[in-house]
Amino acid sequence: MPVHVGRATLRAMETMPPPHDRCPACGTHLPATAPPACPRCALPLVGPVAGELRETDRALLRLDAERGRLLIRRGQLLAQLRPPYPQAPWGAGPGAPWGAPPRREASPRAVQNLLLALGGVLLAVAAVAFTVISWGRLGIGGRAAVLGALTLAATGVPTLLLRRALNATAEVVACLGLVLLLLDAYALHRVAFAEADGLRYAAVSLAAVAALWAGYGKALGRLVLPVPFAVAIGQLPLVLWASAADSAYAIAAALLVTAALDAAAALFTGGRGTRITAAVAGTAVGAAGLLTAGGLSVSAGDGGAALRAGALLLGATAVALAVALRPSVPAAVSGILAGVAALAVVGAAGGVVRTGVTGDWIVPGYLVCAAVVLSAAAFAVPARLRPVAAGLAAGAAAVHALALLWALPSLTVGVVTPDVWEGPYSAVAVTGLLAAELAAAARLHRGTPYAPLAASGALVSAAVAVCVPGPPPVRLVVVGALLALSARALTWTALVSACGLAATAVAWAHPERTTTLTVLAVLLACFGALYAAASRTRVVTASAVVACTAGLAWTGLPAHAAAFTLLAVAAAAQAAALRAPGRPFEHPGHAAALLGVGLTADDPALLALALALAGVLAAAVAALRADRRWLGYVATCLMVAASWVRLAASGVDAPEAYTLPVTVAALAVGALRRRRDPGLSSWAAYAPGLAATLFPSLAAAWGDPDWVRPLCLGAASLAVMLLGARHRLAAPLLLGAGVLALDALHELAPYIAQALGTVPRWVPLALAGALLLGVGATYERRLRDVRRVREALGRLR
């Protein structure tokens, strides 16, 4: 309470009616004209003694007001001196783990849902085990009576639960009813329709169950899960019926028709859960149908088979575009569907073209179809449908990228070897077509940021198309032209050309060590000059400088020796990154260090040393640069990996030797974090470190026939559990208790298995599921009562 409240109280008391309005003795109200004596108690009210009494009453009022103000100020001073949290029992500060206030790490609703879900799953597993395993112990009448009664109870109880506002419990019991309904269909097949075809019977029964369950969900109304579950079950009937026909085309058609129905359900149904389920299921089923139809198109042996597969792909294209053009569909989804439609169209048209050309020209055929789709996206789609146009262009561009990947190995061999071209000329045709398209794109998007990139790609593609199949003089002319362009203008186009020239020159000079060193030295000087001359291209030129330096350090050395020279190059690059503006040498240095570590992969001893040196380098960078403190974690991981590799190379197979150092370090870090942040969860602070040792040791103990490791693990987990209980920390308490219980279960497993051998296996599952379901329902009822009390209190005024 602020100080000004005490002052206001004092002013109010000072402005109270004067004492002559009331009798000082009996408090009787007096008239406006003060009488000589009180009409009730006859106390004299005039004279010097009565005046002094009135002054005494005024002084007492002022003293009471001042005392009230001082009491208020005293409470404020005490509140300022008290700490925000109570002190620890033996003087520890509030930063100690046991001095922090307790935190709830799970909401009541999450606990309720977990109990109900686990109980429902256990009951469903028990019902399946009873139906499949213990079915033969009952007669036909007993079978029908048991399953029928259970199904009627499971489908009728949700109505009663909904009346009591136990919605979550009703959802779980309804799901159990769905499982029992599916088991009824299975039992009916075993009893009455044993001669029927299994796939066709499954298709019909699943369609009937889906329709019945959708009607059940609509009838109850307040249940959320039945209709989405019915949609999920509805994915199977058409596919199973088509599978009975043993035709890949029928299966693909069934998948695509099911996806189309899912799309209609996602667009035109009202429930949010139903729409999401239909959308997810339609996406998965449609992808499976497209892949199946695409595989049929690729493997078609004649034009008729390719046309049938193409018809399926075009049907999927029509559905995808119909959905993409809906105004209610988000722009991102429209773009993705348009991209899928572009791939389907290219697959359909390219599959037909494939049957009429030779093997080397199949990929150019697909590429021509993709070029047609790309042109349609650029010129035929209206501007208002920009997401659809972008999706079509992205799908066609993906086909271009795949064609380039197909041609890249042959082109790479042709570029790096000075011999005569021996690859297929269709790869050159792919490169030439890409160059033409990129040139057209650069002209079409003139003045946009895409134009320079497209022009660079067109230049490089055209150079490769001319250089690869030509004799050495033609290649030299192309190389000279690219070098002249690099010297003429310091642009990104020239830079890409220079990088391609560098790769080609190094590959041509590789067989001779002296020539390789000379070429690398010249390239290092050239890229160094480009780095000094053009600041806006330093990201790439710095990478080229590091690459040339690494090549000079590696040339002529065996891999194991070159690994440590590359680590030295990485250290030099990080040192240069400390001084260079923008630090362009940093990431190339990381790449050099990674390559150096990779060269020692076949020798564990050298690999451990290389990992340790890389960890030292990462730790040094983290210490010298405040913006790279996260490299300390990388250094820790590298050091741990080095120790593990060293232990493995020495033949150590005990998991504790690997995990205990990590656990000690992680627990120390967790303790420091909780001391700085008392509100930090114990799961974030201590669980990673404890799990790093407890879980591997538990796995080793379960496979260890001896008693020493289980005993040591049990003692350690007991100590962890007691420490967690002592300091009220959830993670050590639960992890220690869980590992201790599993360790004890491992020791008692033979005896438990012998005791449970006489009990049907579904009985413990059913009992545990019923118990969890009952506990979850009670939990939900208590939460409902609490909410009602809170709402009732909120309505009070």
Image (spheres, rainbow, N blue to C red):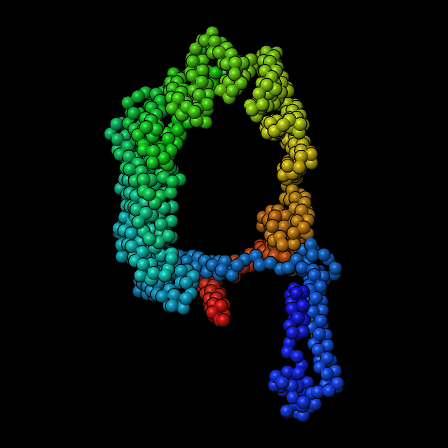
* Quadrant of the rendered image containing residue 636: top right
* Quadrant of the rendered image containing residue 352: top left
Judging depth in this view, the residue of 291 and 337 nearest the camera is 337
User: Vertically, is 645 above or below 579?
Assistant: below
* Quadrant of the rendered image containing residue 595: top right
Residue at the front extreme of this rendering: 33
Number of on-image labels: 0
Residue at the left extreme of this rendering: 304
Q: What's the residue at 36%, 35% (across, down)? A: 386
Give the percent coordinates (x, y) of residue 669. 67, 47
The answer to whether residue 157 is seen in the rendering is no
Image quarter of the N terminus: bottom right
Judging depth in this view, the residue of 556 and 497 nearest the camera is 497
Residue 305 shown left or right of residue 642 in the figure: left
Residue 540 shown left or right of residue 656 in the figure: left
User: Vertically, is 315 above or below 591?
Assistant: below
Q: What's the residue at 66%, 83% (across, down)? A: 20
Give the percent coordinates (x, y) of residue 272. 37, 52
Residue 701 shown left or right of residue 237 in the figure: right
Residue 364 shown left or right of residue 86 in the figure: left
Q: What's the residue at 44%, 21% (across, down)? A: 455
User: Vertically, is 25 above or below 610?
Assistant: below
Give the percent coordinates (x, y) of residue 547. 59, 22
Judging depth in this view, the residue of 249 and 732 nearest the camera is 732
Q: What's the residue at 47%, 9% (across, down)? A: 477
The answer to whether residue 109 is seen in the rendering is yes
